Each structure stands twice: as structure tokens, then as C-alpha cells.
Amino acid sequence: MARYLVVAHRTAKSPELAELRSQDPVDKGPEGARLARESRFVLLVPAVPPAGWVYEEGEIQRRAKEEAEAAKAALEAQGIAIEEAKPGDVSPILALEEELMAHPGEYQAIVLATLPPGLSRWLRLDVHSQAERFGLPVIHVIAH
């Protein structure tokens, strides 16, 4: 059974992520891929600090954990079974790296959910291209 690492923040509850699942066999196309029903998903929600310069690390991790749990519930309501939802580092790339190092060889691909171009901070930071350096296929989902 395939296991996918879903990395999302503001897009974590989006219906576009739920569209990853279909009843068809796995389509291995890099964009708009459909994953088999028996696939397993781990949701990683990078922490986002509040506006301003002063914040406590524990507070943003607590908020990220709450957001991850809320996103898990929202995705499960849309038919996506989330095996685990967890907060990650403020940097989406560092969050990815830490998760992949903690679980080597466990994921078949990375699903990166972003806002559309022009709105997405992650696209401006080139997170999609940087994620490819981990050697796994990157499935990019644009949530509206």
C-alpha cells in the first residue's frame, strides 16, 4: 500500500486535496495525479508564525498542531483517510526534510498543496522545485 506525505498549510482543508483519490488505479502523472483508494496519507502542516517579530516557538507549534488536526477532520469528511496529522517546522522545506529523515523510505511521493500562483508564498519561495531534491516524485496540487 502506497504512503504519501501531504504538505499543506492554508490549503490543508481544500477539496482539491480530496480529489487526489479516485476509484481508478494509480495514475503516475506528476500533475493532477489520481491515487488509488488504498493509499495512505500523512499530513504535515508547517507552523506559521503570527505577524510581527515576537512569538514563542511553543505557541506556533501548538497552533500548527491544532490546524493539522482540523485539516485531518476536514479531509476525512471529504473521504481521505489521514493516517496521521502533525505539525512541522516553520520552513516547509525543513519540515519536509525532518519528516523524511525520521521515516526514510516510507513515502512513495510528496503531495505539495499550494495556493495559486500570485497568491502562494510557497511558490514564490520555489518550495516545489526544492522539494524535488529529496528524490521523491512531487505531486503539486493547487487549491483555490
Image (cartoon, rainbow, N blue to C red):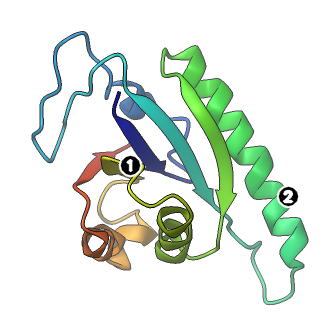
> In the picture provided, is 106 more to the left or to the right than 35?
right
Q: Secondary structure at mark 2?
A: helix
Residue at left offset 38%, top offset 43%:
143
Q: Badge 1: few (under 14), some or many (20 or more) residues near its Cα, within 10 Å?
A: some
Which image quarter holds the N terminus?
top left
Task: Determine the residue located farthest toward the bottom in the rendered image.
Answer: 53
- The residue at 72%/35% (across/down) is 70
Residue 3: x and y in percent read 40, 38
Residue in the picture at 69% in, 56% down: 87
Percent across and percent down for residue 58 are 89, 70
Q: In terms of image quadrants, where is residue 37? A: top left
Look at label 1 and name its amino acid: Tyr
Return the disc, 1 or 2, that comes first in the chain's sequence: 2
8 horizontally vs 57: left or right: left
The residue at which mark 1 appears reads as 107
Residue 21 image offset from top left, x and y in percent: 32, 22
Identify the amino acid type marked 2: Arg
Q: Residue furthest top?
A: 23
Q: Position of residue 72 (x, y in %)?
A: 63, 32
Circle count: 2
Residue assigned mark 2? 62
Q: Residue at x 72, y 46 (%)?
A: 67
Quadrant position of residue 125:
bottom left
**Nearer to the camera, 90 or 36:** 36
Say left or right for 46 vs 93. Answer: right
Taking 91 as reference, is 61 left or right?
right
